[in-house]
Image (tube, rainbow, N blue to C red):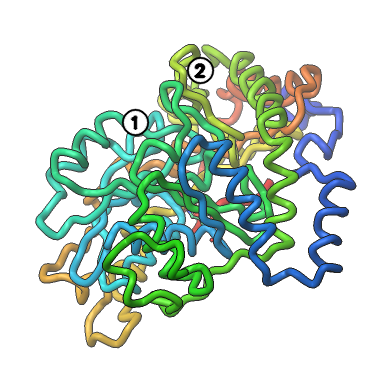
Amino acid sequence: MTEGKSKLALLGGSKAVTQQERDMFTWPILTKEEDKAVLEVLHNRSMSGSDVTMAFEKEFAAWQGVKYAMGSSCGTGALHSAMFGCKVGVGDEIICPSLTYWASCLQAFSLGATVVFAEIEPHSLCLDPKDIEHRITPRTKAIVVVHYLGYPADMDPIMAIARKHKIKVIEDVSHAHGGLYKGRRVGTIGDVAGYSLMSGKSLAAGEAGILTTNDTEIYERAVAFGLYERNNANTMQTEALKPFVGLPLGGYKYRMHQMSSAVGRVQLKHYDARIAEIQKAMNLFWDLLEGVPGIKAHRPPQNSGSTMGGWYAAHGLYQSEALEGLSILRFTEAVAAEGAVCYAGCNAPLHLHALFNTCDVYGHGKPTRIANTDRDLRQPKGSLPVTEQINNHVYGIPWFKHYRPNYIKQQANAYKKVARYYKELLEGDTVKGVVEGSSHLSRR
Ligand SMILES: *Cc1c(COP(=O)(O)O)cnc(C)c1O
């Protein structure tokens, strides 16, 4: 292709996106309300108190429609406490997808337990219910379900398997606050849920997390694990915990910082309205790209009662076979050159990482992954083929925070244009590299 003759910006053409609207991506949205709430905590010198956190917990529990919510200093702590709440302990196994962030499962090591990874579904990027049951052993204590990149995991069959085998289900809702699965809020379907409220997440309070459950024993065990000052003789109902009230059972302190609790309260108040606008914007983007070869939405079918919540770190699915095998790296490079948000890959699979293969974290004299159980359950390359290939089929898209059709159309046009003139890109497509993914998702 001769320079200048191409329509594609990457090959000298003009860009599809000419508008610059940075605030389309600014998150969280902050107003004077947060300023006031944070300064109040500061000047009350109550950063380490619990009153604002408990008010936030009450509002969060009401919003989710659950009995208990427990604030935590981070999502990692909330999920760690959830595992302890479910009695994940010495010699136990948890089943978890490999396509996620560390904190969905790695805390199991510190409880004396270990992790078995299961496969994902390529359309949802969430745990494949058909790949769980054969991995259950007498040691399996819990299944961790991640509503990955906002997509609600297929909870009905997963719950049926868990009930049949009498094991717990822990939902990791760090990507999907406010999302629905067949009309039900994600985070209320399993036995317990942990949510990150980190500032990059969809519900953003700062370094913070929260746990929700309807189960009194799980809740009280979670409290006793990391919130010793709330492990209180007057409120604890669980008999087994009563001799140990006031003690930090886990040896961890996971108290939520009250400046974050204050931010969380204000964010939560506006959250439903804000994600309704995000949903309208994101759905318009995908509606505009419906039927474009090579490009497929990562969202549940419309009118299924399932939604993407706040569309945390929105991504799309790539089908290179529809574009004569054009590599995802070349594709995303060309879309980005149009001035649109587009980048290849998502999380790197955990099961191939050294931390789950060779690393002896606690000095057992062998890798922790196998030291905590009685068999070598490591999963080498090739063991989870869908997960291992997925980074070549997933790309980040613009995560719109506002419904502005003209701007959204420009971004969608960049994708359409590349799919239309893709043949021009085949010639220079020498990269053919494999996208490795990253240990955490890029913040856009
Ligand atoms: C962010 C995240 C967590 C951990 O939350 P922190 O607040 O960062 O500790 C857990 N699971 C997933 C899937 C996440 O993306």
Provide residue 31's location: percent of width, then percent of height: 86, 44
Local crowd size for mark 1, using a 10 Å CA cut-off: few (<14), some (14–19), many (≥20): some
Q: Amino acid at mark 1?
A: Asp
Instruction: Depth check: give the residue in front, 126 or 261.
Output: 261
Q: Quadrant of residue 304?
A: top left
Left or right of residue 380, residue 252 in this image: right
Labels 2, 1: front one = 1
Left or right of residue 189, residue 132 in this image: left
How far apart are labels 2 and 1 at the CA level?
Answer: 27 Å
Whether residue 304 appears in this view of the structure is yes
Provide residue 251's location: percent of width, then percent of height: 43, 79
Residue underneath mark 2: 293
Q: Amino acid at mark 2?
A: Pro
Left or right of residue 375, residue 38 in this image: right
Residue underneath mark 1: 154
Which quadrant would the N terminus be assigned to in this image? top right
User: Image point 60% across, 52% down: which residue?
Assistant: 197
Please determine whether, in this image, residue 261 is positioned above or below residue 312.
below
